[in-house]
Image (spheres, grey):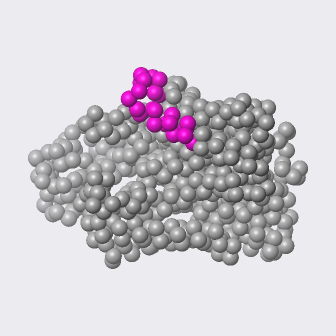
């Protein structure tokens, strides 16, 4: 709460100039003020900058806020003003002690711990005391257990039962609880993801070709990966995410959405309707349950922003929508068609590994295996690093209305430690999962329609740690709910899986532009989003076609048995490809379609 005119002072110096303005700044106001552009109306006439387009506000280490603007004397020179927040002032005055000074902690990581974990520790728990958070817990239980069981089934087939649904449930529950408690962005949901499952299947194939035990090879690859990710965390490597633009984000997010939709349709259509070994009654009922569950989930989500009923009723129905959808599909199958056999959830009666092996994986291996596993680990790190940071950056997108600061380096530290333990126990690697994370974030948003434009606007977001922690704890307790959960048909969860995939695709500008290509060219202007209003049609079409080609290459390599292990490198290659765009597109067009944005 201060005027920029008080901070911007004239100076004869053309170099960087710094003033400290005491306690005038609000720490809350600038907690997420990284490279936010302010309007020129905030700039005093005394500064001589009224006609300048913008100045920048940046959050600096130790809670300091930096205002940077063009110099009056020299247009290209920069002048900055650092404003101390209240937290910074108290620290510098000696009234408080920094617990992290006792040990050496790298600068970026220390800042994440101090500002995000410690600075908002109390509110991270108290902000969950509301009905919306309770609904989100139940919602995320079903939204998370569905992919956990589905990916568990995929891993079971891909790894010869070395890793199955039991291991996925245990890893999801324990890792999810720990991550929710200590991560920098607790709204992120970690779990099995399509790309990581694919990579694990590739490692199983490599182990089989080399004639070595898969779990031993998997453990060493995981330990090397964890060590590299730990180094990334303490060296601030996550700062490099700023060089990745929407071009890569949207392709990766689109890949996740397509995997969700693909696996859902694959079960309902390929494994049932087109499978001659499945009876016609079972096949048709499975397809019907999938469609019914998806329809109910979509209807309840749409009802949340409709004009029907009161505000409280719409909020409750929308928040509990997935639970209503799962209950509807399950009850329909149980009461209307009890005589038709359906594939149900396969959960263990006791807490044991899928094959009955010991929980601790043997690390006994030759030096060639131990050090040779560093090669696939290096490629795997690229996937884990990008999967984690891209998903967290999508969650931290300013469009979602979050106010608390981010903590990429703390996220990476927690992830590296979890992967090390998971590798030793023969559990699947858990990483930030895009679809559940976005669904989790949206379940905590309060929306309202703009009376003028009719567009949905975010009014509030419940930023806290309880919903992720409690929903993952429920997944861990699911073994106690076996009598109930065993009555849920897989087809019902596939319908919810389909809903999650489509929800993930919403807001993806890449997918929206593909849809725009299918619209009659004479009517495209009626559906044109604002960011394309000043971009020539041939330009955004060329940009979209390049994205489509890139996505096709990524999917082809991912599905390839010979080159599948290299698909993380394809994702990484999108970064230099984007830098080549300056030769193919004008700068003004790229700034509108795919601007460089600080995370």
Task: Give the residues drawn in magenta, as a range.
Answer: 294-315
Question: Which quadrant: the C terminus?
Answer: bottom left
Residue 307 within the segment the image draws in magenta: yes
Which residue is situated farthest in the front direction here?
280
Residue 529 left/right relative to 119:
left
* Residue shown at 74% from the left, 52% from the top: 153
Q: Main secondary structure of the magenta part?
A: helix
Residue 214 left/right relative to 377:
right
Q: Where is residue 504 in the image (x, y as percent from the top left)?
A: 51, 49
The front one of 241 and 328 is 328
The front one of 83 and 171 is 171
* Residue shown at 79% from the left, 32% from the top: 483
Residue 386 within the segment the image draws in magenta: no
Q: Position of residue 338 (x, y in %)?
A: 76, 34
* Residue 191 shows in the view: yes
Q: Where is residue 251 in the image (x, y as percent from the top left)?
A: 49, 62
* Residue shown at 34% from the left, 35% from the top: 449
* Residue shown at 74% from the left, 57% from the top: 275
* Residue 392 shows in the view: no
**418 over 557 or under it: above or below:** above
**37 over 340 or under it: above or below:** below
Q: Where is residue 486 in the image (x, y as percent from the top left)?
A: 77, 37
The part of the image, by quadrant, that contains residue 193 is bottom right
**577 over 179 or under it: above or below:** below
């Amino acid at each position: 709460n201060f005027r920029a005119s008080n901070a911007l002072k004239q100076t004869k110096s053309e170099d960087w100039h710094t003033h400290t303005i005491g306690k005038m700044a609000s720490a809350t106001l600038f907690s997420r003020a990284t490279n936010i552009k302010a309007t020129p109306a905030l700039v005093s006439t005394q500064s001589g900058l009224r006609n300048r387009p913008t100045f920048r506000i940046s959050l600096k280490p130790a809670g300091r806020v930096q205002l940077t603007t063009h110099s009056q004397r020299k247009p290209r020179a920069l002048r900055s003003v650092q404003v101390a927040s209240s937290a910074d002032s108290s620290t510098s005055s000696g009234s408080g002690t920094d617990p992290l000074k006792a040990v050496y902690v790298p600068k970026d990581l220390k800042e994440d711990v101090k500002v995000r974990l410690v600075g908002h520790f109390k509110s991270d728990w108290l902000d969950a005391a509301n009905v919306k958070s309770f609904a989100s817990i139940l919602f995320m239980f079903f939204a998370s257990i569905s992919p956990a069981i589905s990916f568990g089934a995929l891993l079971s087939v891909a790894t010869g039962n070395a890793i199955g649904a039991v291991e996925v449930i245990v890893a999801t529950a324990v890792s999810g609880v720990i991550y929710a408690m200590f991560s920098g962005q607790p709204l992120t949901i970690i779990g099995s993801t399509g790309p990581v499952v694919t990579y694990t299947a590739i490692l199983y194939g490599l182990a089989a070709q080399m004639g070595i035990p898969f779990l031993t090879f998997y453990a060493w690859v995981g330990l090397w990966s964890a060590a590299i990710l730990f180094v990334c965390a303490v060296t601030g490597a996550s700062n490099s995410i700023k060089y990745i633009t929407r071009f890569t984000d949207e392709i990766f997010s689109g890949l996740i959405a397509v995997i969700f939709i693909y696996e859902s349709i694959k079960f309902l259509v390929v494994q049932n309707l087109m499978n001659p070994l499945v009876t016609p009654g079972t096949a048709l009922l499975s397809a019907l349950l999938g469609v019914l569950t998806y329809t109910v989930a979509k209807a309840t989500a749409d009802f949340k922003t409709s004009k029907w009923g009161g505000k409280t009723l719409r909020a409750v129905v929308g928040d509990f929508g997935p639970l209503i959808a799962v209950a509807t599909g399950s009850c329909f199958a149980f009461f209307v068609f009890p005589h038709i056999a359906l594939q149900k959830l396969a959960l263990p009666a006791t807490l044991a590994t899928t094959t009955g092996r010991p929980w601790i994986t043997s690390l006994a291996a030759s030096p060639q295996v131990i050090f040779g596993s560093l090669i696939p680990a290096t490629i795997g790190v690229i996937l884990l690093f990008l999967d984690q940071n891209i998903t967290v950056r999508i969650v931290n997108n300013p469009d979602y209305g979050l106010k608390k600061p981010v903590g990429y380096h703390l996220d990476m530290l927690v992830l590296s430690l979890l992967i090390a333990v998971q590798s030793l126990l023969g559990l699947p690697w858990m990483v930030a999962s895009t679809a559940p994370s976005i669904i989790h974030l949206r379940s905590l948003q309060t929306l309202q329609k703009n009376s003028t434009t009719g567009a949905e606007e975010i009014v509030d977001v419940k930023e806290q740690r309880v919903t992720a922690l409690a929903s993952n704890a429920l997944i861990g307790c699911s073994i106690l709910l076996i009598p109930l959960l065993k009555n849920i048909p897989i087809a019902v969860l596939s319908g919810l899986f389909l809903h999650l995939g489509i929800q993930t695709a919403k807001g993806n500008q890449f997918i929206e532009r593909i849809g725009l290509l299918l619209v009659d060219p004479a009517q495209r202007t009626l559906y044109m989003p604002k960011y394309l209003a000043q971009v020539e049609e041939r330009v955004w079409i060329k940009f979209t076609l390049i994205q489509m080609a890139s996505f096709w290459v990524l999917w082809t390599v991912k599905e390839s048995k010979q080159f599948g292990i290299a698909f993380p490198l394809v994702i990484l290659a999108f970064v230099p490809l984007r830098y080549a765009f300056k030769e193919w597109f004008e700068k003004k067009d790229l700034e509108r379609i795919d601007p460089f944005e600080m995370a």
